[in-house]
Image (cartoon, grey):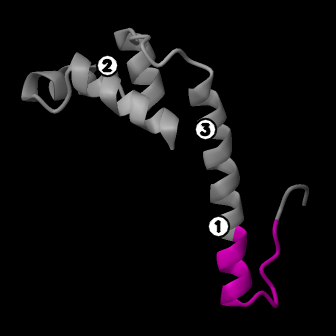
């Protein structure tokens, strides 16, 4: 059972710490990825969809509803890079 975790005899405090460590590690990796980009660089529609892990139809719908715009998305991406 390679790369598996056995939760036998694991209390809630230890499980909570394992989860926190895992999330922290993933966020640090995500932050490093974001910091490699120029903050003034705009993303294409395809790049935005990949970045947000959404379908292009979702991005289209969000744009039409005013949920996102080029300016909002650029602001969002810049703020994520600072996290």
Regarding mark 1 in the picture, which secondary structure is present there? helix
Q: In the image, is 11 to the left or to the right of 69? A: right
Q: Nearer the viewer, residue 36 or 21?
A: 36
Q: Residue furthest right?
A: 2
Give how far across and how far down residue 35 sits, in percent. 59, 27
| Element at label 2 | helix
Q: Find disc 1 in the rendering and name its residue.
A: 20
Density class for disc 1 (Cα within 10 Å; few <14, some 14-19, many ≥20) is few
Q: Report crowding for label 2: few under 14, some 14 to 19, many 20 or more residues within 10 A (C-alpha).
A: some
**Residue drawn where x is 42% and y is 13% of the image:** 40
Identify which residue is drawn at 63% across, 29% down: 33
Q: Residue furthest left?
A: 65
In this rendering, the answer to whether 78 lies above or below 42 is below
CB-based contact (under 8 Å), mark 2 and mark 3: no
**Residue that mark 2 sits on:** 56
Disc 3 element? helix
Among the two numbered marks 3 and 1 on one chain, the one whose residue lies closer to the N terminus: 1
Pointer 3 with pointer 1, Cβ within 8 A: no
The part of the chain drawn in magenta is 5-18
Q: CA distance from mark 2 to mark 1?
A: 32 Å
**Residue position marked by numbered label 3 in the rendering:** 30
């Amino acid at each position: 059972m390679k790369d598996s975790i056995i939760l036998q005899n694991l209390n809630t405090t230890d499980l909570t710490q394992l989860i926190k460590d895992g999330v922290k590690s993933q966020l640090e990796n995500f932050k490093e990825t974001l910091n490699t980009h120029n903050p003034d660089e705009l993303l294409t529609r395809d790049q935005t969809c990949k970045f947000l892990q959404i379908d292009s139809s979702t991005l289209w719908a969000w744009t039409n509803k005013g949920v996102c715009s080029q300016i909002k998305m650029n602001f969002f991406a810049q703020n994520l890079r600072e996290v």
